[in-house]
Image: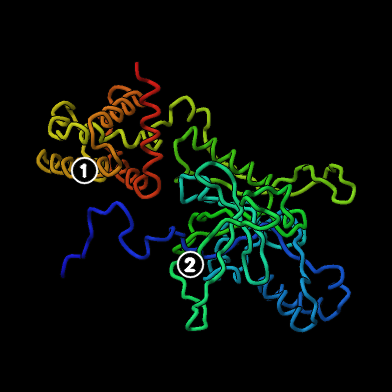
Amino acid sequence: MHAPITYGGFDGPRSLLEERPMRPPIIGKIRPGIKVLTRKARENPEAVRIHDAMVAQGHSYEAIGLEIERRTQLRNALVPKNVPWFTCRGSDFTNPAVADDILQRYGEDRGDGNGRKLWRFPVVFAFDDWLRNMPNELVTYTASGKQFFSEYGPDGLRYCKTYAPVQREARASRAKRVWGGRPIILRQDDAIPDGRCDPHSCPQYQQGVCNLSAAFYFAVPATRGLGLIQMPTTSIYVLQKAHAAMQTVALARGRLVGVEFFVSKQEVEISRIDPELGKPVRQMQWLITLDADLDLAGLLDGSDRPRLSHVEAAQQAVTALENTPQTLLDQSPGFPPLDAEKSLSGVQPVQGAETSDAEDLAAAFNELATRLGFDKEPDRKDLREFLQASFGVGWTKRPAAVRQVIHDMRVALENNPVAYREQVKAIAAEIAP
């Protein structure tokens, strides 16, 4: 077979597909609640019959609402209702069997008459950046889609964005073709002349048509499917608690990927402003919560340090930085085999094979270190100090993590190489004499 065509030496996009932000595929949606008929819809026997029949058949709430509107002319016949469980329906998944599998694995029948429901289930996040795991924005929707939405600028300020009007061809009397999506511009009108997103002065927010929109993106262990599952939310309380949970784990463990969180609901008392009285009122509400079965004290005192991303990177650092894999082997008597399966079976690889494997890993790490920006001696010195200070003397004698090191650096290179370099520089500067 012919070798695959590769393109090297590019610092920017290599393809039309890489010009746009990467969005992971979504295979389904787990909803944080249910939808029920409005008071007006409950007074219509036909709407009630359609609703009950389609719910029993497992149809999505969108399909139920559209069918009620088509047959009874009742618009917006369904409203959200907060319940202590999650809704996992086959109609919300590209493969309905995935929803059934999740419900069978993690669902419970608590004998309350609601049948088997999803009360608590494990999730694994795909990114170490909490914002990619739960993106959020203030957004205004119209019948044709997004009208206004918030984005943060490089200056750290929040701006109100919108889509630029589509230009028209003067000679062809038709709209110009748009490449790469509709252009995004600052909103600048009489209400928001400077483009700043300020809910207190935003007419859409004050009218209740601009609201917080967010979603969690995760994978559920032991389920099949090439993509992530989405769970939407509009609660700032949920986002604040989830952000605190992710930041706590990231601070102690160094990363979020690989941690098994548990999603459940907790009934808590929240405060809101009564729109008619203008005074704060307290009410009970079921909120999504994140938890993790971790020994946080052990993580904080360093006993679980080898699971940190930069701890894993330490295993091959000397080989890569010194470019002398054989020297590392010579300096480490009894250097264990890198092949865990052979080690467990009692078969020791020959010295030549071990050296060759170490050289291959060193070359891979060296290339990744260069691509991550550690190609100059001051940068490599920072990396050496960072690894030595983080893990102490003898960390080079734990070669079992070498392959994981290369994997972690590839992830850093793909997701956020700048953050990785800044982390190394910050810690190196902190420990510098």
On the image, the x and y values in percent for residue 259 come to 48, 44
Q: Name the residue type under label 2.
A: Gly
Q: Name the residue type under label 1.
A: Leu
**SS assignment at label 2:** loop
Q: Are marks 1 and 2 in contact (CB under 8 Å)?
A: no
**Image side of residue 396 versus residue 197, left or right:** left
Between 121 and 2, the residue placed more toward the observer is 2
State which quarter of the image contains the N terminus: bottom left
**SS assignment at label 1:** helix
Q: In the rendered structure, which disc, 1 or 2, sits on the residue that comes first in sequence?
A: 2
Whether residue 37 is visible = yes
**Image side of residue 224 versus residue 363, left or right:** right
Q: Is residue 10 above or below residue 358?
A: below
- Which mark is drawn over residue 30? none
Asked where in the image residue 427 lies, by quadrant, the reply is top left
Between 181 and 243, the residue placed more toward the observer is 181
Residue drawn where x is 50% and y is 63% of the image: 183
- Which mark is drawn over residue 361? 1
Numbered marks: total? 2
Residue drawn where x is 57% and y is 53% of the image: 216
On the image, the x and y values in percent for residue 82 come to 75, 56
Q: Which residue is mark 2?
A: 181
